[in-house]
Amino acid sequence: MRTRTLVVSLVLLCLAIFAAAFVLYDRSEGTNEPAGVEKTALLRDHSPVLGPEDAPVTIVEFFDPSCEGCRAMYPYVKQFMATYPNQVRLVLRYVLFHKGSEEAVRILETARQQGIYEPVLDAVMEAQPQWHDDPDVAAAWDAAKLAGLDVEAARASMNASEIDDIIQQDAADVKAVRISGTPTFYVNGEKLNRLGPQELYDLVTSKVESSR
């Protein structure tokens, strides 16, 4: 009887050890999974959003306003959003790879404070060839003013701590996600591995279809 009790106890002990090891392994796998890190760094509450907040499909663009590729893709992104006006939203994450990029971001963020983010974004991107890699981004300021920006108020608030925080957090997330070039797109968390209008459209369309 004692032998049987001892055997049963040993079996239960082994099962408990196995279960504990499985839980620890599962947690360890979760913390080391790259996709988990990327998911937390892709979306932030502070990021500007174009399109409906509750859209089932989210395009996240790691975006440098001074990047010529970003300017080339921007009309296509807007076209895709117009194609799916209720299903797609765009979240912009800032990347500062060029001279003048930071000041351009500060222009955009002051425009957001003034409630005219999208028209100023459109104007600044259209005028990009005139201010690309210009550390003073004079043409960007001119374009923003024509789009309705109160430049005096913008210059007074462009170095506010909340804008600093957005820039710093985005810079940290750029490192976490290992962004090496712009634009880089994610659609509902899936990275667009080959950059091109058709490739992005196909990925967006597939996510829209799967959300229905």
Image (spheres, grey):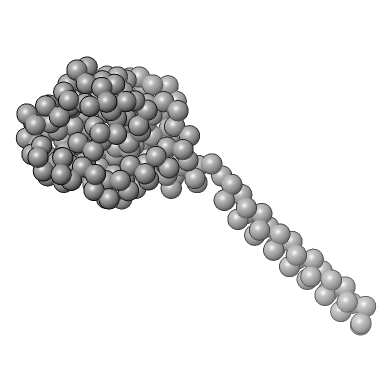
- Quadrant in which residue 212 is drawn: top left
Q: Can residue 51 be seen in this view?
A: no
Q: Residue at x 11, y 27 (%)?
A: 142
Is 156 in front, or is 47? 156
| 6 relative to 114 in the view: left or right | right
Position in image of residue 124 (x %, y %): 18, 27
Position in image of residue 71 (x %, y %): 26, 22
Is 38 in front, or is 97? 97
| 11 relative to 186 in the view: left or right | right
- Quadrant in which residue 96 is drawn: top left
- State the residue lying farthest toward the bottom: 1
- Up the image or down, 104 lies above or below 43; here it is above
- Quadrant in which residue 155 is drawn: top left
- Up the image or down, 157 lies above or below 184; here it is below
Question: Which image quadrant: the N terminus?
Answer: bottom right
| 56 relative to 158 in the view: left or right | right
- State the residue lying farthest toward the top: 129
Q: Is residue 65 visible?
A: yes
Q: Which residue is drawn at 50% across and 46% down?
A: 36
Is 175 in front, or is 60? 175
Position in image of residue 28 (x %, y %): 62, 53
Q: Which residue is drawn at 32% across and 31% down?
A: 63
Position in image of residue 66 (x %, y %): 28, 25
Q: Which residue is drawn at 71% across and 59% down?
A: 21
